[in-house]
Image: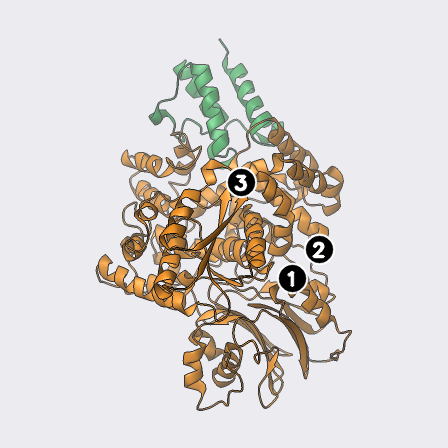
Amino acid sequence: MCGIVGVTAWASVHPLSPTHPIHAGLAAIRHRGPDAALADQLGGAVFGTARLAMVDKPTSSQPMRDPSDRYLLSFNGEIYNFRELREELAPRYAFRTTGDTEVLLAALITWGSGALPRLKGQFALALWDARENELLLARDRFGIVPLHWTTDSGAVHFASEVKALKALGLHPELSLPDVIDAGVLWGTHPGRSVFDGVEQVPPGGFVRISDVTVERGRYWAFRYAEDRDSGSIDQHAEKLRALLACAVERRLPVYGDLAVLLSGGLDSSAVLALLRQAQPSSRIASYSIQFTQAALNEESFQAVAAAAFDTDHLSILCGDLSVARTLIEAVEHAEQPLSRTAPASSIALAATIEAQGTRAVLSGEGADELFCGYDLFKVAAIRDAWSRNPDGDEYAQLLSQVMAHQKGMGRAVERAFYEQGIDRRSDPLFSHLNRWGASFRITQYLLPDLRRGLSTDSVLAGVRDRLPYEYAGWSAVEQAQYLEVTYFLASALLAGQCDRPYMAHSIEARYPFLDEDVADFALTLPEASKLNGLQEKAVLKRAVGHDVPAAIRDRVKQPYTAPEGDVFRTQPGRELLDRYTSRETLEAAGLFDPKRVAWLRNKLDSGATSFHDDLALLWIVSTQALADSYGVADPKE
Amino acid sequence: MKDRTALIQELRDLILDRLVPLDDDELINDAPLVDEVLDSLGIAEVAVFIEDEIGRPLDPDEEVRATFASVDAVVDFILANR
């Protein structure tokens, strides 16, 4: 993985020199690529790459030109099938290096944007064609690797992270509508960022820009197969296991240790099991976070997995204090308001992993979205059935069963929360109405002028407007999967909790469950293979159930979460509140209502805060921290 | 025994002082509480308020949306079950 940054201009071109802003842009993302920072100019394009050398260290330097000096490429990520592509391209292209960068370059030259669906990997790329004066930006299917872009004074600027755009001399400011989306939806719309005028290349998308046109396209979209795999669940499981094993093998690092992020749950344990089978004699490191709060701690399961697969296991202990200490650093790297504190724990773990000299880790992220791991999907199924039979007695009981293991949610009264929207089955966002309806309440902390006219439906209109036409034909559960992949996975998880905290310490995380072949197969599965009654990830448990210890296979899924509201009751947490929620600070940013924020702080001081109170506090503090660094675009415009 | 007016005022005080940062004129007695005002902790707090007033725990089949539908609905329930 690396960091990339660049400027392309069609009129006045600022020639590359030691004082060119590209060097400041590279310095701003040095954490993504500590091995080298180089810039190059080709015609109207100045590109820079801060390189984290994971393949072909000696010769695959970037930015890379093709032999004719027509094309310039900066690329961040990994192309896992580069060897197969190289074989296919070899008759037409004289390779000078052994790495994936040149294979990607050759593929783009040969097939244009038609190369993108052929790639198996995680990537963000920028390609300049100096003859056509055209820039191509593209990103992997799920948005594992970030890529932002904006226009200014006739030039296009792009970068892995917004801080590099700022270092180029631009002035990105927070955009209130997108800040609201990030808080309510736990993610931004595909292609949006929380910065005014700054777009992200959408997952599975590309942008092609010339001096007169901007073309935004998709080369892949999350769509279920029309004809589902008709095999048995055992057949599905066998196929899935084989694909996962391949996905793990593809992701073995060329240099450095083998390592896994180990949560103690089924997904990361499965990745570790398959890695151990692929590498029976190699040293494997495993890294975990333990929480001081017993309710969040999965230490015993982590220990079971580490022992079963004979890893060199290292864990860090996180609690309210440590989370409070790393929270702002996590926000600065996430470059979006946080909807959970987990990134703060991730960034602490990343620092430990970096100190061990590990550069790449395998992660189990993606399994819950693709194979219905979250309780959200069970709740969607129950509510869907309940909506068609409102007088049915069994649904309340089923809901209580699902909710029973969630901490502090034992009362039947919680059902009242989930009964909301039962009569709104025709709403395309039925599966997420409870969550988003509840999280919309954070907007009550905005200034009166800014919250006037806002409603849950006005925020959700942005989601409804973007739904694909096939969506209406999907079940409630599969609609929920789509929404989780599009909003939560892309923004809160892959960006906020994975890429940014780990790249903050030059660690590349790799995701076997998001492998193209695994994902394509998951999209052919019937729902019952994913959610079988109330059994989550049915096919995955069948696929890897014998590979992982029984204690892990049979355990009740614990949502991975981190300390929330109590974080702000610690000394450093209070200092954060004093710094970011004082009347003066709030008035300077002009977003939040000081009286209402003070009410929330009093509630924190005097008693229990709810999950949504904590969400609001986190949103306010993280937004204020970003406003401090970047400013806020006029909210009234 | 508290009358309807007193119950409404106590419930409103609970909601505005401890549960949601609304101004007094923003809390409408017949507006949907569960759908628009309270989160899950708020619902639980109102459940405790109800139980204190009626002197017994709520039955599971009473812990439904209709009971918590609005300030008026909560007070109606209390009055009917004291």
**In green, which chain?**
B
Farthest-out residue, top: B1
| Residue A162: image tag | 1
Taking depth in this image into account, of A288 and A522 the one nearest to the observer is: A288
In this view of the protein, can residue A593 be seen by the observer? Answer: no
- Numbered label attached to residue A563: 3
In three-dimensional space, the C-alpha distance between marks 1 and 2, rounded to whole angstroms, equals 10 Å
The chain that hosts pointer 2 is A
Q: Amino acid at mark 3?
A: Pro
The x, y position of residue A95, in whole percent, is 51, 87
Q: Within 10 Å of the Cα at label 2, are there few (<14), some (14-19), or many (20+) other Cα atoms? A: some
Point out residue A226 in the picture as x, y percentages from the top left corner: 31, 65
Same chain shared by disc 1 and disc 2: yes
Chain of the residue where label 1 is placed in the rendered structure:
A
Amino acid under disc 1: Val
Kindly identify the residue that appears in the image at 39 percent across and 34 percent down.
Answer: A415
Q: Quadrant of residue B18?
A: top right
Q: In the picture, which chain is orange?
A: A
Q: Residues within 10 Å of mark 1 (few under 14, many from 20)?
A: many
Is residue A179 or residue B10 the one in the foreground?
A: A179
Disc 3 crowd rating (10 Å Cα; few below 14, some 14-19, many 20+) is many
Quadrant of the image for the C terminus of chain B? Answer: top left
In this image, A588 relative to A366: left or right? right
Q: Three-letter amino acid code at disc 2?
A: Tyr
The residue singled out by tag 2 in the image is: A630
Q: Position of residue A255 (x, y in %)?
A: 50, 70
Can residue B42 be seen here? The reply is yes
A124 above or below A455? below
Name the N-terminal-most of marks 1 and 2.
1
Instruction: Verify CB contact (< 8 Å) between mark 1 and mark 2.
Output: yes
Can you name the residue that lies furthest to the right here? Answer: A19
